[in-house]
């Protein structure tokens, strides 16, 4: 199971994903860790039948408000290419198991797609 994702794009991806760059395999209701200013782990990161998906919080990583939902088909090796799907969203549906999207990724309707290349696993 993936434990953490960091998305460094420098700019929002085709108008999508203008939020905190990271997500963890945790529910913000039961964070793995917390910070001194209310930051906490969250994002529901999960791998559901080869589809990696997560919810991106707005800046500040409190996971009280959201910027987008992401999905990416699992890439096998460094240099592999794929498409990152993103849908702006101010809310994130809770996973079926209450913890991660490994229990089922949310359906993205009309997502923005951006080509990517895997540079590290």
Image (tube, grey):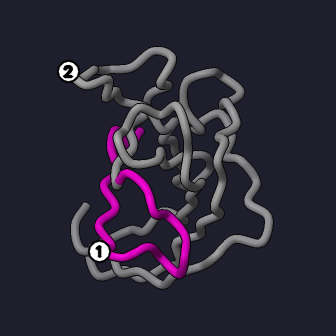
Q: Which residues are magenta?
A: 1-20
Extreme-front residue of the structure:
37
The quarter holding residue 120 reads: bottom left
Q: Which mark is residue 10?
A: 1
Please say if 120 is above or below 32: below
Residue nearer the viewer, 2 or 12: 12
Name the residue at 55% across, 24% down.
99
Extreme-top residue of the structure:
30
Name the residue at 62% across, 21% down.
98
Compared across the picture, whether 43 is left or right of 5 comes to: right
Name the residue at 29% across, 82% down.
79
Quarter of the image with the N terminus in it:
top left
Q: Secondary structure at mark 1?
A: loop
Please say if 59 is above or below 72: above
- Percent coordinates x, y for residue 47 in the rendering: 52, 46
Q: Which mark is residue 64?
A: none
């Amino acid at each position: 199971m993936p434990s953490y994702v960091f998305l460094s794009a420098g700019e929002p991806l085709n108008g999508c994903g203008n939020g905190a760059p990271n997500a963890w395999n945790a529910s913000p209701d039961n964070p793995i860790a917390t910070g001194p200013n209310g930051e906490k782990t969250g994002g529901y990161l999960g791998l559901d039948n080869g589809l990696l998906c997560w919810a991106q919080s707005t800046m500040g990583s409190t996971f009280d408000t959201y910027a987008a939902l992401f999905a990416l088909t699992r890439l096998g090796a460094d240099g592999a290419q794929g498409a990152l799907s993103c849908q702006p969203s101010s809310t994130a549906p809770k996973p079926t198991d209450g913890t991660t999207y490994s229990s089922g990724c949310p359906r993205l309707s009309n997502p923005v797609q951006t080509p990517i290349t895997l540079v590290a696993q």
